[in-house]
């Protein structure tokens, strides 16, 4: 529609005329600046849009679809714009044509609404494409072989589903038992359409079958749009459209379009399906006759001729005439002589009485003697004929012989089997023994007559009679039962038997009889009872054990926990299988335990470690843990079984012992510490005295005052460091070890003991090399070193007191070699006597006189080093004693 054909962008109008027309006129238009940016829009146009028309943005960015015509400034655009697409108020697309007019420094863009026409053309194009697609697929279907028709049908439905945007499409074809789904196409996540053949059959009886209609299934409560394809004998195909309102989804598709589209495709499909059904029926009949060795025959009493199926004559080695028959005497040649007279008599009786007959006869055919079933009946009255069939039953006769032999073998097997096979008849709701194998007598010494003439409950143990009654009720209710009870033998002893029985029913579902098996399981039952008692004793032992016993998965989820563990973790009333042991561990401990479990292998399944658990009520517990991993055939860890004990009290006692030993060490250092504190105090007192004297003489200069104050500040810091070190050393250790530098512990130990040694004239030597960090407690290692230094100080002091010319010294060294840190403390005292050297680390063993030592220092030190994974040893050298500490390098 060239409605701006007469306009030219170069035509200039007075500004006042253009502006007046725009202001006073009505319609759709936009005001644009010279760059093509929106300045304003008409009221009619604003009512079409969902939001306020933005100003100050380029028109090209406001379009719902990009346009090649709107590019650059408006003076480069064509005067007539063929397609402008914008968003409507309800989210739909609005299609316009535009005309561009200059206005002052800007432009006016007039718009003509073409939305209805564009949508109509789009729907018509979709309709045409769908019909063209269906015609193309129908032509392919006409040329396709019947075996490929189902695949082409699925392809056609999938194409329709994509073009119509329908969730589910299907084709229903008639079958021997009603309508069946031949092919369908659906979205990957669309639920299948639930339809019912019986309900659809009722629809065909009640409504017009020639037009599409909406179907509401009364069984599944589903709705669908049904389109029929009808032939002379009724509807042959239903097209089912489900999951959407087809009229709204495809408004451009009329009922006639649906019917015509289906007719194009369904006509060759229906023809091909019928062809396949006929061919399949012919093949089945042919195969059936050939496999079963069956064929028809006919005897005409007037002509004395016998007709038969060609395949039957060929099998029997008979030559048929051109008319397909032969004489009666010729056909009787192949009959066994004993059966010939019988067959002739049977034919005469049939013709006289008009009744049917069936006989088993033996025939001599090409490949030997065969047994056949010969059946026939008379048809016709004026010219009666005998028509029937012949079927090879040689296999059946052989099977009967084999069955008889198998039955004899089975009876022999049952009579000698270790189990009793029985049959109980069902009469008026009661069960009575009808058959028992001969093994009953071998097993229990009873006969079937004994059980038939006496109540079976009299043979049962008194405690098991109620169990047998419940077994019978369950058998009649469920049709199967398996139970154990005790049966008395003929000598009065009771046997445990396993009763496996099944109830048989007739075609109406009524009970007829019970077949079952009785097996002597006395030994197995007694062994099982023994195992159960053993397991019960084991369970009581585990549950009542004071030890902590549990099982858990590789992710620490508990599968079993005994009572002490449940009580310790506060899990009473909860399911231990839903509890994870990791929730009671610190995050770093949990990761370490998981790594420890990952190192377990089938060759090294056992491991030991100490766990710190955080229990409810802000309680902590130390458990000594021994775990064994259980692995599958591939070596994969599947479960861990652990046994532990609560060492919390021992751990707390050890901590108190360490703390007490630490306090004792501080007491031994009291003199040295007092002297160490006295030095800064003396310096501060002298500095203050000098300040007072200068102040009295009025001779206090600023420089002098600053010097004295600086000295006072340094001495205060020195005293503060001594106090802080003693305070830190004296407090309780943290519950878990950390990485620290052992050289720093050496330096601080020397700092606390050097003053006391200096007062006693002891030379203290120190040799330190850079070493790696170790894991443990800094203050505890310092406690061990101070204890060794004080012991060395005591030893060299005692020797110096006896030998005035002796020069005492104590030496401490630290170095690293082969992944371990070594620290030695040695002296030139008297050493340790041979009787005490091997017992020096035992509690209450000391080299000091009574009243001067507790004998716990070295024992506590030995425990601290052992807890850190290290070793503490001692030896005498040519001048005194040497204590050696070795610690493993810590792991980050």
Image (spheres, grey):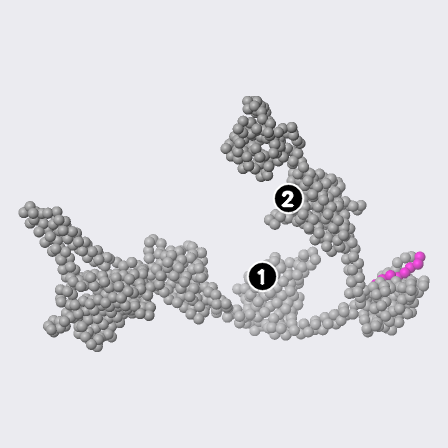
In the image, taking residue 862 as reference, residue 225 lies left or right, namely right
Q: Which residue is mark 2?
A: 165
Q: Nearer the viewer, residue 154 or 703?
A: 703
Secondary structure found at label 1 = helix
The relative height of residue 872 versus residue 679 in the rendered view (above or below) is below
Residue name at image x 59 percent, y 38 percent: 67
Give neighbour class at mark 2: few <14, some 14-19, many 20+ (Cα, 10 Å): some
The relative height of residue 670 versus residue 110 in the rendered view (above or below) is below
| Residues drawn in magenta | 382-389
Quadrant occupied by the N terminus: top right
What numbered label is drawn on residue 471?
1
Residue name at image x 54 percent, y 64 percent: 464
User: Horizontal and vertical percent for residue 820?
Assistant: 31, 68
Secondary structure found at label 2 = loop
Residue name at image x 58 percent, y 35 percent: 76
User: Horizontal and vertical percent for residue 771?
Assistant: 29, 65
């Amino acid at each position: 529609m060239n409605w701006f054909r007469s306009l030219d962008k170069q035509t200039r109008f007075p500004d006042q005329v253009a502006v007046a027309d725009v202001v006073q006129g009505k319609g759709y238009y936009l005001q644009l600046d010279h760059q093509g940016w929106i300045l304003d829009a008409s009221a009619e146009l604003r009512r079409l849009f969902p939001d306020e028309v933005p100003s100050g943005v380029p028109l090209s960015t406001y379009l719902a679809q990009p346009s090649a015509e709107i590019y650059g400034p408006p003076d480069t655009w064509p005067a007539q714009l063929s397609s402008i697409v914008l968003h409507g108020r309800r989210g739909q697309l609005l299609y316009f044509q535009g005309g561009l007019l200059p206005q002052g420094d800007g432009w006016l863009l007039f718009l003509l609404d073409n939305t209805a026409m564009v949508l109509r053309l789009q729907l018509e194009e979709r309709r045409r494409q769908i019909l063209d697609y269906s015609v193309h697929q129908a032509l392919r279907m006409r040329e396709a072989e019947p075996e490929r028709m189902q695949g082409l049908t699925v392809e056609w439905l999938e194409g329709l589903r994509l073009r119509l945007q329908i969730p589910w499409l299907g084709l229903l074809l008639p079958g021997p038992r009603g309508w069946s789904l031949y092919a369908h196409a659906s979205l990957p996540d669309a639920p299948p359409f639930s339809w019912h053949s019986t309900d659809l059959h009722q629809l065909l009886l009640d409504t017009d079958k020639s037009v599409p209609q909406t179907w509401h299934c009364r069984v599944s409560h589903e709705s669908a749009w049904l389109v029929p394809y009808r032939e002379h004998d009724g509807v042959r195909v239903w097209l089912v459209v489900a999951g959407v309102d087809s009229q709204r989804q495809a408004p451009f598709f009329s009922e006639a379009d649906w019917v015509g589209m289906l007719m194009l495709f369904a006509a060759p499909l229906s023809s091909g399906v019928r062809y396949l059904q006929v061919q399949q029926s012919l093949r089945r009949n042919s195969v059936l006759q050939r496999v079963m060795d069956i064929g028809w025959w006919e005897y005409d009493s007037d002509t004395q001729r016998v007709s038969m199926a060609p395949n039957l004559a060929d099998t029997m080695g008979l030559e048929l005439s051109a008319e397909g028959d032969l004489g009666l005497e010729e056909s009787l040649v192949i009959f066994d002589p004993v059966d010939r007279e019988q067959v002739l008599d049977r034919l005469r009786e049939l013709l006289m009485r008009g009744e049917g007959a069936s006989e088993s006869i033996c025939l001599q055919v090409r490949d030997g003697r065969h047994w056949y079933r010969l059946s026939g009946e008379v048809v016709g009255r004026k010219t009666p004929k005998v028509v029937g069939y012949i079927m090879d039953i040689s296999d059946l006769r052989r099977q009967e012989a084999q069955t008889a032999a198998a039955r004899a073998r089975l009876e022999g097997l049952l009579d000698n089997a270790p189990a009793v096979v029985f049959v109980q008849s069902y009469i008026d709701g009661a069960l009575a023994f009808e058959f028992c194998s001969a093994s009953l007598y071998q097993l229990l010494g009873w006969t079937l007559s004994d059980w038939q003439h006496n109540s079976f409950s009299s043979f049962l143990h008194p405690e098991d009679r109620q169990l047998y009654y419940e077994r019978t009720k369950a058998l009649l209710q469920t049709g199967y039962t398996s139970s154990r009870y005790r049966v008395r033998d003929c000598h009065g002893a009771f046997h445990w038997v396993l009763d496996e029985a099944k109830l048989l029913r007739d075609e109406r579902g009524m009970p007829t009889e019970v077949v079952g098996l009785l097996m002597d399981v006395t030994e197995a039952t007694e062994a099982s009872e023994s195992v159960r008692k053993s397991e019960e004793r084991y369970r009581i032992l585990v549950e009542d054990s004071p030890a902590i016993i549990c099982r858990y998965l590789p992710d620490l989820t508990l599968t079993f926990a005994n009572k002490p563990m449940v009580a310790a973790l506060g899990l009473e009333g909860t399911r231990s299988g839903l509890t994870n042991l990791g929730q009671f561990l610190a995050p770093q401990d949990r990761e370490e335990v998981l790594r420890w479990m990952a190192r377990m292998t089938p060759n090294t399944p056992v491991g030991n470690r100490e766990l710190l658990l955080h229990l409810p009520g802000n309680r902590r517990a130390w458990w000594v843990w021994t775990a064994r991993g259980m692995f599958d055939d591939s070596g994969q860890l599947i479960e861990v079984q652990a046994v532990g004990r609560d060492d919390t009290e021992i751990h707390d006692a050890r901590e108190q012992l360490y703390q007490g030993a630490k306090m004792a060490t501080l007491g031994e250092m009291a003199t040295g510490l007092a002297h160490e504190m006295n030095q800064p105090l003396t310096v501060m007192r002298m500095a203050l005295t000098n300040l007072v004297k200068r102040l009295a003489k009025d001779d206090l200069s600023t420089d002098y005052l600053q010097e004295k104050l600086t000295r006072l500040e340094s001495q205060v810091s020195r005293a503060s460091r001594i106090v802080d070190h003693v305070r830190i050393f004296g407090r309780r250790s943290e519950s878990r070890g950390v990485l620290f530098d052992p050289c720093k512990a050496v330096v601080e130990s020397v700092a606390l003991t050097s003053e006391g040694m200096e007062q006693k004239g002891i030379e203290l030597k120190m040799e330190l090399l850079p070493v790696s960090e170790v894991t443990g407690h800094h203050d505890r290692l310092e406690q061990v070193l101070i204890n060794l230094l004080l012991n060395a100080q005591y030893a060299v002091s005692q020797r110096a007191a006896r030998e005035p010319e002796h020069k005492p010294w104590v030496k401490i060294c630290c170095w690293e070699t082969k992944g371990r840190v070594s620290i030695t403390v040695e002296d030139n005292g008297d050493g340790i006597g041979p009787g005490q050297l091997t017992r020096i680390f035992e509690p209450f063993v000391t080299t000091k006189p009574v009243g001067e030592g507790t004998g716990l220092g070295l024992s506590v030190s030995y425990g601290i080093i052992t807890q850190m994974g290290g070793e503490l040893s001692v030896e005498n050298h040519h001048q005194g004693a040497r204590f050696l500490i070795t610690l493993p390098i810590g792991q980050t």
